Image (cartoon, coloured by chain):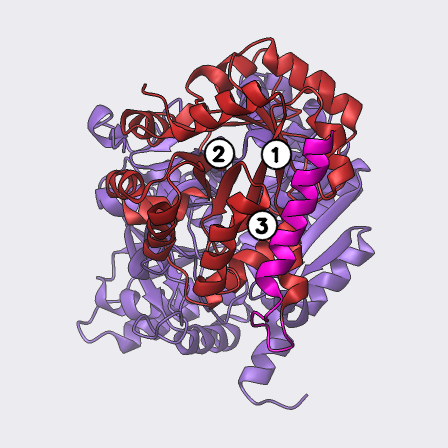
Chain colours: A purple, B red
């Protein structure tokens, strides 16, 4: 086994990965069937060309500004800050900001990636788009950009998720996408990704696969990260304008980890910035197959084109995992996060379903913002962390999605009758 | 590297002047004992080379038939250690029929690559097909497998163009597995004439035998595909025969072993008649 470490080669930077073979240290790579390899190599070439083309960046920036509504605001969550200060036993309590990516068109950070990838698909001359989706946020964003550019689109979504995220299913239909419910496995995100890969291998000539998170075979983890890094780049500028300095603490939720890597990556070399990724602890890390915390409760393995931390048994069979949040309910994680965990640059923690539900309610009542269940996980960790930090600690949490899609499910969990 | 059972088998097929039949079944489908009986019966039924699937929870390149087969095996408690034990048992009575383990990388990686290769050699495995380890990652598994004396059989596909083919062939040994369609296992039947062109293209670049698979279900298809190829692979049709033979409780019946072996006899008969 090869364990060449890019960490050793690039001691001065956490931001220069992946290497030319798509590795972040041990993690990443390109583990796909031969049918897909030529296309993956084409994609890598197309992305390298696009990166060097000012016209590509100009078109993406224009879409980000006038279609997605970027930059998203950096918002001082004043009442929550006060609340955490009241909770503080040390007389502290961080100053909490939200990066408001839930205000983007389509309601989450997913549009950042989809706009970038649809432009790549067009450059490559592809005429048909496929994607997987868990919570449906990515599916909606894909359906949206396909409508915007007039490309036919098929979305694979686990049958279980189709049920628990029905508002997003309706949105995808209205945007003209075909939604294919996937019944294999537990009918969640991993199974949807398997089916999308099967479609891709069958229709490889004309089809572009818009992967929704910073995972999959190289160059997906890199290009998704690059498109999402607009989050962190904006935060740097906005924080300089608001506070005259960089933040001290960053917090984001982790499923596959695209919103998190987008926030984290521009700050990785700022050694004084503490960075926390929050995994879905489900029923608790001690409950077998009861959580979706790949890094805190899994082991390295190879799935969906990359080596990364996976929820799996000791025979290498992948577990379904569990989270109240359909967007975090995935047995893997982007390979760059696995590397950042092993290097210790980012601290990965987990919160349970119940903690996320509590944060969801707190945010709605304290700030008038109904978060998606995914960033509710990030907020649940902020609830623990912020009161322990000093008052001059500036904390930024990525509010990566809005909770419209979750209100009925959460009402059900809370036993509310509407 | 030294001559393997696979090399010897293709040499004897050549001297007999016929194309071989490569059969795929999943280890432990529908349960260990029944699968072991199927395995033991395959050579007499006419299988020239046996591909034994290492079940995986997420077989991304496989269609519904092999997905279901893999899940049946896992549900019945199949694990890598049992798959290797099944090969070792088979070798007690058959020292000639080549066995190729086929599957996905993760169960091997988790077992530990070095330990896996050592145990596979010890069990009497002859070759490996690992669907999701491309030539770009040869240093991880392919080269160590070759060094351990195993054949590493690579898939070539309709998307493997002239520029890429040499890379795919570079460290391949035993034979080349030509995937006759862009798609998953058990999908649409391939167009025989297109397959012949593609096989000829591959054969122009290598002296290795070429086996053709994906979508071959019947003796007639096998015979048509076999022209110009050194062997034909049949998999989904066999595991579908297992599935259809099961009782309402999903368990093996008195029919299960015969259902598979009878189909293998038909396929072998058709190939030999061709």
The stretch of residues the image draws in magenta is: B247-274
In this view, the residue farthest toward the left is A90
x, y percent for residue A97: 41, 57
Please state, as top left, top right, bottom left or bottom right, where the N terminus of chain A lies in the image.
Answer: top left
Quadrant containing the C terminus of chain A is bottom right
- Find residue A396 and report its horizontal and vertical position in percent: 38, 54
- Judging from the image, mark 3 belongs to the subunit labelled A
Q: Please check whether the numbered discs 1 and 3 fall on a single chain.
A: yes
Q: Which residue is tagged 1? A: A116
Callouts 3 and 2 in the same chain: yes
Left of A269 or right of it: where is B31? right
Give whichever of discs 1 and 3 has the lower sequence position.
Answer: 1
Residue A66, above or below B70: above
Asked if badge 1 and badge 2 are on a common chain, one would say: yes
| Residue A70 colored in magenta in the image | no
C-alpha separation, residue under disc 1 versus residue under disc 3: 23 Å
Q: Residues within 10 Å of mark 3 (few under 14, many from 20)?
A: many
Q: Residue at x 37, y 40 (%)?
A: A336
Q: Quadrant of residue A27?
A: top left
Disc number for residue A194: 3
Q: Is residue B273 above or below residue B237?
A: above
Relative vertical location of residue B129 with respect to residue B229 in this rendering, above or below: below
Q: Nearer the viewer, residue A288 or A401?
A: A288
Going from N to C along the chain, the mark reached first, 1 or 2, is 1
Quick one: SS at disc 1?
Answer: helix
User: How many numbered discs, if any?
Assistant: 3
The dot on residue A226 is 2
Q: Please give the chain letter of the residue carrying mark 1.
A: A
* Residue A67 visible, this angle: no
């Amino acid at each position: 086994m090869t364990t060449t470490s890019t960490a050793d080669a690039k001691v001065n930077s956490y931001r220069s990965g992946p290497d030319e073979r798509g590795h972040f240290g041990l993690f990443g790579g390109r583990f796909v069937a031969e049918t897909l390899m030529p296309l993956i190599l084409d994609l890598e070439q197309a992305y390298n060309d696009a990166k060097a083309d000012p016209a590509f960046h100009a078109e993406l920036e224009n879409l980000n500004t006038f279609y997605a509504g970027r930059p998203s605001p950096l918002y001082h969550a004043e009442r929550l800050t006060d609340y955490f200060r009241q909770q503080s036993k040390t007389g502290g309590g961080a100053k909490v900001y939200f990066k408001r990516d839930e205000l983007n068109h389509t309601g989450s950070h997913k549009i950042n990636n989809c706009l970038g990838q649809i432009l790549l698909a067009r450059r490559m001359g592809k005429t048909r788009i496929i994607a997987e989706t868990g919570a449906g946020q990515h599916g909606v964003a894909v359906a949206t950009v396909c409508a915007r550019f007039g490309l036919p689109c098929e979305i694979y979504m686990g049958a279980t998720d189709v049920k628990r995220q029905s508002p997003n299913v309706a949105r995808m239909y209205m945007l003209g996408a075909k939604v294919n419910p996937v019944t294999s496995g537990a009918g969640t995100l991993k199974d949807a990704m398997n089916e999308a890969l099967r479609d891709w291998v069958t229709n490889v000539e004309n089809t572009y696969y818009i992967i929704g998170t910073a995972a999959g075979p190289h160059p997906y983890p890199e290009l998704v990260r690059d498109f999402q890094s607009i989050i962190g780049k904006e935060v740097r500028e906005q924080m300089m304008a608001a506070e005259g300095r960089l933040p001290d603490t960053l917090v984001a939720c982790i499923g596959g980890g695209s919103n998190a890597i987008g926030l984290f990556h521009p700050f990785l070399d700022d050694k004084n910035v503490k960075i926390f990724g929050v995994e879905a602890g489900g029923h608790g890390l001690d409950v077998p197959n009861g959580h979706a915390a790949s890094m805190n409760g899994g082991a390295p393995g190879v799935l969906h084109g990359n080596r990364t931390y996976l929820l799996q048994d000791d025979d290498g069979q992948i577990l379904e995992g569990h989270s109240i949040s359909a967007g975090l309910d995935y047995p893997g994680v982007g390979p760059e996060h696995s590397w950042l965990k092993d290097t210790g640059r980012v601290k990965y923690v987990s919160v349970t379903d119940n903690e996320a539900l509590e944060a969801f309610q707190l945010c709605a009542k304290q700030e008038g913002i109904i978060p998606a269940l995914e960033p509710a996980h990030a907020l649940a960790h902020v609830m623990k962390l912020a009161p322990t930090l000093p008052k001059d600690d500036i904390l930024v949490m990525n509010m990566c999605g809005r909770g419209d899609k979750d209100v009925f499910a959460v009402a059900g969990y809370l036993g509310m009758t509407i | 590297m030294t001559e393997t059972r696979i090399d010897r088998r293709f040499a004897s097929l050549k001297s007999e002047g016929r194309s071989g039949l490569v059969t795929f079944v999943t280890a432990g489908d529908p349960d260990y004992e029944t699968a072991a009986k199927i395995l033991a019966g395959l050579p007499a039924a006419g299988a020239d080379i046996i591909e034994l699937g290492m079940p995986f929870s997420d077989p991304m390149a496989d269609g519904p038939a092999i997905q279901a087969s893999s899940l049946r095996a896992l549900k019945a408690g199949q694990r890598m250690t049992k798959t290797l034990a099944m090969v070792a048992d088979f070798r007690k009575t058959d020292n000639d029929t080549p066995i190729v383990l086929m599957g996905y990388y993760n169960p091997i990686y988790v077992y530990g690559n070095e330990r896996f290769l050592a145990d596979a050699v010890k069990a009497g495995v002859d070759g490996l097909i690992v669907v999701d380890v491309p030539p770009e990652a040869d240093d991880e598994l392919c080269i160590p497998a070759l060094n351990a004396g195993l054949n590493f059989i690579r898939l070539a596909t309709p998307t493997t163009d002239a520029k890429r083919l040499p890379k795919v062939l570079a460290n391949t040994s035993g034979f080349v597995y030509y995937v006759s369609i862009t798609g998953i296992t058990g999908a649409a039947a391939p167009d025989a004439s297109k397959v012949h062109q593609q096989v000829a293209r591959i054969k122009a670049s290598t002296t290795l035998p070429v086996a053709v698979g994906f979508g071959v279900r019947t003796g007639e298809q096998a015979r048509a595909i076999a022209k110009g190829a050194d062997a034909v692979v049949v998999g989904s049709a066999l595991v579908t025969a297992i599935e259809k033979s099961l009782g309402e409780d999903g368990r093996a019946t008195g029919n299960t072993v015969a259902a598979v072996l009878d189909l293998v006899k038909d396929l072998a008969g058709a190939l030999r008649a061709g």
